[in-house]
Amino acid sequence: MPRLAVSVAALVGWAGAAFAGPVPPAAAPAPGVLIAQVDDSDLKDEETLNELMVEEYDKDAWSMGSAIGLSLIPGAGYGLVYAEKKAQSVVPFLVSAVGYGLGAAYLLGVFDETSKQVCLHVRDGKVPLDECEIGGRAGDNQQIDGRSEDMNTPYFATKADYTRGVQGEDFDGKDTGVLILGATYAATTILGAVWAAMTVADHNDRLKKDIESTAQAPSPTFRPVIGGDRSGGLMGFAVDF
């Protein structure tokens, strides 16, 4: 739409003549207000307010995809580091270290165990396995059992004091290790991803509100003020906030 431009020089000349005092009609300056059409076709390429707001938001907003994607890396705290929460990222990193360390220990057989046969004496507890066999073995069962109460009773008479048993259990920690590693990854990844996503969402929401608040804030406007009477004239600008 065409804009109108008013010759300021003409207005200033008119105002100056007015301030100089009354003049005869014949000496009054001729009207010098010039009106011209100004081509505003160049304005069609200017960005709208909404476009400027979107551009400002995109410049400072954090990426939700990056925060969640980084949380998928073992350790799960990298998404929080991206969201500028380095102190909070220690939590998933620490939980990951403990879980992965324990799982690796099970995989490496640190907690593996194998059962074995043992001989238990009624009073002395665990004794050499051979002592459970002496009492029932021909020839040897005539030997004196040094563990007997009178220290003079042969093994065949004290064989009831010995019991064969099993100590420990067969345990292979590989399956347990895999389970712990998987559970650790799942738990820490969920923790890190949700925490990072909430942080990013909060940051982007505050950023959007700040931009909208700034865009909606009133800006000063200027309007010309022109007046005059028989004694003089006035020209200036009024500022509205």
Image (cartoon, rainbow, N blue to C red):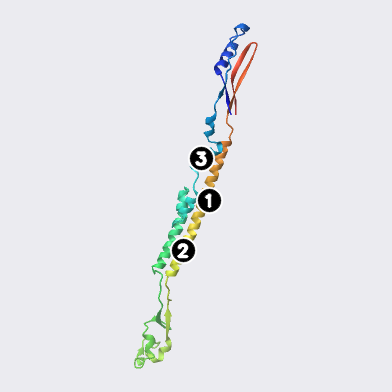
Tell me what residue is drawn at x 52 percent, y 54 percent: 194
Where 27 falls versus 129 (above or below)? above
Q: Tag 1's secondary structure?
A: helix
Q: Where does label 2 land, which residue?
A: 182
Q: Tag 3's secondary structure?
A: helix
Mark 1 surroundings: few (<14), some (14-19) or many (≥20) residues within 10 A:
some
Q: Is residue 116 visible?
A: yes
Mark 3 surroundings: few (<14), some (14-19) or many (≥20) residues within 10 A:
few
Distance between the Cα atoms at labels 2 and 1? 24 Å
Most foreground residue, 13 or 120: 13
Most foreground residue, 11 or 167: 11
**Residue type beneath disc 1:** Met
Q: Where does label 1 land, which residue?
A: 198
Q: Where does label 3 land, which residue?
A: 55
User: In the image, is 234 to the left or to the right of 104?
Assistant: right
The image's mark for residue 170 is none
Mark 2 or mark 1: which comes first in sequence?
2
Mark 3 or mark 2: which comes first in sequence?
3
Find residue 163 and report its horizontal and vertical position in percent. Answer: 43, 85
**Residue type beneath disc 2:** Gly
